[in-house]
Image (tube, rainbow, N blue to C red):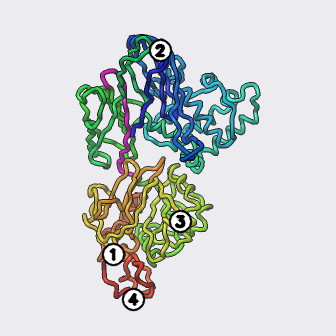
């Protein structure tokens, strides 16, 4: 959702009042007679608190919007409101003589103060407008900040700001403490900012227990610009016209693809509060690299072909007839995380469904136990907090069907695993629990990477969503199991590839980009199915996921297993999920197939 922009109301005398419901600063450029000559810039105060306390009931209420009074005078005015961070003109990024530049200065300064407040505590409030004199921002800094904002990547945004802080620590010390600044403070801020890149702190910053979270999210959700055309006569507003920047939107088809796929983009769902879509102009940046790949044009449709695999952020800008610009980005995955790892780190405490199928699949693909390229290690959950995780080299496999102690240990180290992926690692997360080991992901309070929502729902049938993609190419469209999936997933990150769905159309096998790395998450009992692939086709997926991440070809027929670990043949007839009303002592050869 866009959220509500600041708005204008009449006030006593020649005054008007800007009412800001957002937690970020806005500035207003005042243009008499709706011309191009800037008369004044007004700093519109931000809403500082999320909650207010009061005597009576309820004791806690939402904080009121912030008000800023300004003496406008009689006449006809264009009031251009902006929250800044317009990276289209790097030269005016911190220019206090422009509305965008001044708003950027205020919001940049407030971001620094919020980040430092986490590790230092209450800080002196320096003159915000002095910040540009102490700050040097590179093209790389600007690009990283811009890209994270366009992606809606709050973690990346904070990380980029921490990097900017490290690179400018000495200047920021002098900005905050002025003549009392010391070399020790400079070194402390440099060290603290580096530590703040830890996602655990980022999660704290993103929480909504105070005003920091809403401040960061308003950079992403709040409208960047809004214009008002105001006529005031004898100190009273007699006419107000609002123009909000276009609400950009687009779709693309197919939802994912490979190198050479022709993607069709359609921005026909864009809306504007003043202009019809035929009057709007569109331009596209296929990689969000700061270089527009098309010029402004009135056609809302476009096509593009990518020449390399990866995750791409597609940026669309839409301009209305009065020059206001709205933008949106969407994530598009080409090829996914193919070939992103060479070594396997398999974490497990017990054999899922009493099966050694994962190791069998690895060895059938040519992996051997050991360290280095084309090898695998089996690691217990007691080492989750200490074993080295190497982005760009390791594929971490979180096994299906583990005991409760395993999931509890993962929960204690889940920030570490998330960091591994975010900094370029690859992870295959087996989220199929409630199996023979009776472990529960939800009982361990695990947050799945990408913050996706997991819902237990047993289904004997899964459907392949996009048969043309390499990971599932050649599989039957219908995959059977007993069960074919234990969980499904919702609240998926933008751009997620959905390889399989259950019969309720919810995702059961997904891949998505997380920061610089890749995740595949399954709710399917793949190890169980791999041992029974002749009867149950769900097992055919298992070696394909490993092959996808490592780039190793599957020899011979898909999922042709060589050996199966089993304590006895009876277990082959045991379904992947033990119903709550059936005892472990049940003779599973007698259980009916579901």
Image coordinates of residue 3 in percent, x first then y, are 42, 37
Q: From the viewer's perspective, is residue 200 above or below residue 501?
A: above
Q: Mark 2 and mark 3: span between their CA atoms?
A: 58 Å
Q: From the viewer's perspective, is residue 111 above or below residue 366?
A: above
Residue 328: say if magenta: yes
Write down the region rendered in magenta: 320-336
Residue 563 visible to the viewer: no
- Which of these two is toward me, 235 or 324? 235
The residue that label 1 is drawn on is 482
- Which of these two is toward me, 459 or 290? 459
Question: Which quarter of the image is occupied by the N terminus?
Answer: top left
Viewed as shown, does residue 143 lie left or right of 172?
A: left
Q: Nearer the viewer, mark 2 or mark 4?
A: 2
Mark 1 or mark 2, earlier in chain: 2
Viewed as shown, does residue 44 lie left or right of 357?
A: right
The residue that label 2 is drawn on is 72
Viewed as shown, does residue 504 lie left or right of 180?
A: left
The residue that label 4 is drawn on is 587
Q: From the viewer's perspective, is residue 121 above or below residue 362?
A: above
Q: Residues within 10 Å of mark 1 (few under 14, many from 20)?
A: many
The residue that label 3 is drawn on is 444
Q: Residues within 10 Å of mark 3 (few under 14, many from 20)?
A: some
Instruction: Identify the element where label 3 is drawn.
Output: loop
């Amino acid at each position: 959702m866009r959220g509500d922009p600041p708005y204008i109301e009449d006030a006593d005398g020649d005054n008007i009042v800007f009412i800001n419901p957002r937690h970020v600063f806005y500035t207003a450029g005042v243009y008499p007679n709706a011309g191009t000559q800037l008369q004044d810039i007004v700093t519109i105060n931000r809403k500082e608190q999320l909650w207010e306390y009061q005597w009576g009931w309820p004791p806690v209420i939402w904080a009121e919007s912030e008000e800023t009074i300004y003496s406008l005078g009689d006449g006809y005015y264009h009031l251009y409101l902006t929250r800044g961070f317009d990276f289209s003109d790097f030269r005016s990024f911190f220019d206090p003589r422009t509305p965008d530049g001044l708003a950027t200065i205020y919001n940049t300064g407030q971001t620094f103060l919020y980040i430092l407040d986490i590790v230092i505590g209450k800080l002196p409030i320096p003159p915000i407008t002095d910040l540009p004199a102490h700050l040097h921002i590179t093209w790389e800094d600007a690009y990283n900040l811009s890209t994270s904002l366009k992606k809606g990547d709050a973690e990346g945004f904070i990380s980029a700001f921490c990097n900017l802080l490290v690179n400018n620590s000495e200047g920021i010390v002098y900005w905050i403490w002025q003549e009392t600044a010391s070399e020790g403070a400079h070194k402390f801020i440099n060290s603290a900012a580096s530590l703040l890149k830890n996602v655990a702190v980022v999660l704290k910053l993103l929480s909504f227990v105070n005003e920091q979270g809403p401040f960061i999210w308003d950079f992403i959700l709040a409208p960047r610009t809004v214009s008002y055309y105001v006529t005031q006569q004898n100190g009273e507003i007699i006419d107000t016209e609002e123009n909000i920047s276009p609400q950009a939107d687009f779709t693309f088809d197919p939802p994912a693809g490979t190198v050479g796929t022709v993607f069709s983009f359609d921005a026909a769902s864009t809306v504007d509060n003043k202009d019809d879509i035929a009057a709007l102009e569109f331009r596209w940046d296929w990689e969000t690299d700061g270089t527009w790949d098309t010029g402004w044009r009135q056609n809302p449709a476009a096509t593009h072909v990518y020449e390399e695999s990866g995750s791409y952020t597609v940026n669309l800008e839409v301009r209305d007839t009065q020059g206001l610009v709205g933008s949106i980005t969407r994530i598009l995955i080409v090829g996914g995380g193919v070939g992103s790892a060479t070594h396997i780190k398999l974490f497990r405490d017990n054999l899922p469904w009493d099966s050694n199928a994962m190791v069998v699949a690895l060895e059938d693909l040519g992996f051997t136990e050991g360290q280095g390229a084309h090898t695998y290690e089996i690691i217990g959950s007691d080492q989750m907090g200490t074993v080295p995780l190497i982005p760009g080299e390791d594929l971490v496999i979180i096994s299906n069907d583990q005991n409760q102690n395993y999931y509890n240990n993962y929960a204690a180290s889940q920030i570490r695993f998330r960091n591994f992926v975010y900094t370029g690692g690859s992870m295959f997360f087996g989220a199929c629990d409630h199996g023979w080991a009776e472990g529960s992901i939800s009982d361990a309070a695990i947050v799945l990477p990408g913050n996706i929502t997991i819902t237990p729902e047993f289904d004997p049938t899964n459907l392949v969503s996009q048969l043309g993609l390499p990971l599932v190419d050649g599989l039957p469209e219908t995959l059977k199991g007993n069960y074919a999936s234990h969980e499904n997933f919702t609240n998926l990150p933008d751009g997620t590839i959905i390889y399989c769905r259950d019969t309720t159309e919810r995702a059961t096998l997904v891949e998505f980009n997380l920061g610089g790395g890749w995740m595949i998450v399954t709710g399917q009992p793949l190890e169980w199915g791999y041992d029974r692939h002749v009867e149950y086709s769900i097992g055919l997926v298992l070696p394909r996921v490993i092959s996808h991440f490592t780039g190793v070809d599957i020899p011979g027929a898909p999922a042709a297993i060589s050996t199966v670990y089993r304590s006895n043949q009876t277990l082959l007839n045991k379904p992947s999920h033990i119903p709550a009303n059936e005892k472990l002592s049940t003779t599973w050869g007698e259980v009916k197939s579901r």
